[in-house]
Image (spheres, rainbow, N blue to C red):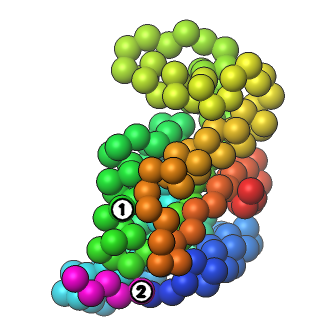
Amino acid sequence: MSVQIKCSAEEALKKLKDGNERYLAAEKSEGDISPALREKTCKEGQTPYAIVVTCADSRVIPESIFSAGIGDIFVIRVAGNVIDKNQLGSIEYAADHLGSRLVVVMGHTHCGAVGAAMGHAPEGFVKFITDEIKKAIGEEKDDYKACCLNVRNSVQIVEDSLEIKDGLQVCGAVYHIEDGKVEFI
């Protein structure tokens, strides 16, 4: 199977950083969501330049944060941006079949899942998420530091679990809810 590479990991990271700069100054989303692009991607398929694994928090909207439009980024959302076999399979698909060369694991400030892992004993299915975060953050009580530890852990899981080859790169990021800035770590 021939995979179309839209851009390198370095080019993808620059596009994300540039898009976040536009987002910081914007009043409305700048991503292309036009009928023409919807039709084109329907007929020709998608070639996202980056894979973004992020939290399901409704305040974190990767397409807006990176000024991306339809087909630009392959977004995987799960509370606490934790990584399991489902997320790994989705990353693998986007890399192997869609040609994406960059994986960004993006946490965010004021994350409810991280907060729950730091100070609560959740029950039910959410415990699967908070247990994973707790392993990543240990006894850390600072919200920002815990967020970074959780992101770094997820990055490490991706790097350890997938065959990192052919220019595929993995990096971490933190989205600052209070001002919209993305910090690549």
Question: In this rendering, would 148 be left or right of 111?
Answer: right
Within 10 angstroms of label 2, few (less than 14), some, or many (20 or more) residues? some
Residue visible at 57% across and 77% down in the picture: 9
Label 1 vs 2, first from the N-terminus: 2
Please give the residue where the numbered disc 2 appears in the rendered image: 5
- Determine if residue 22 is in view: no
Residue 121 against residue 84 in the figure, above or below: above
Quadrant of the image for the C terminus? bottom right
x, y percent for residue 94: 36, 68
State the SS at label 1. Answer: helix
Residue visible at 55% across and 9% down in the picture: 121
Please give the residue where the numbered disc 1 appears in the rendered image: 92
Q: Main secondary structure of the magenta part?
A: loop
Residue most toward the left?
A: 43
State the SS at label 2. Answer: loop
Q: Give the residues drawn in magenta, as a range.
A: 1-5
x, y percent for residue 15: 62, 80
Residue visible at 52% across and 28% down in the picture: 132
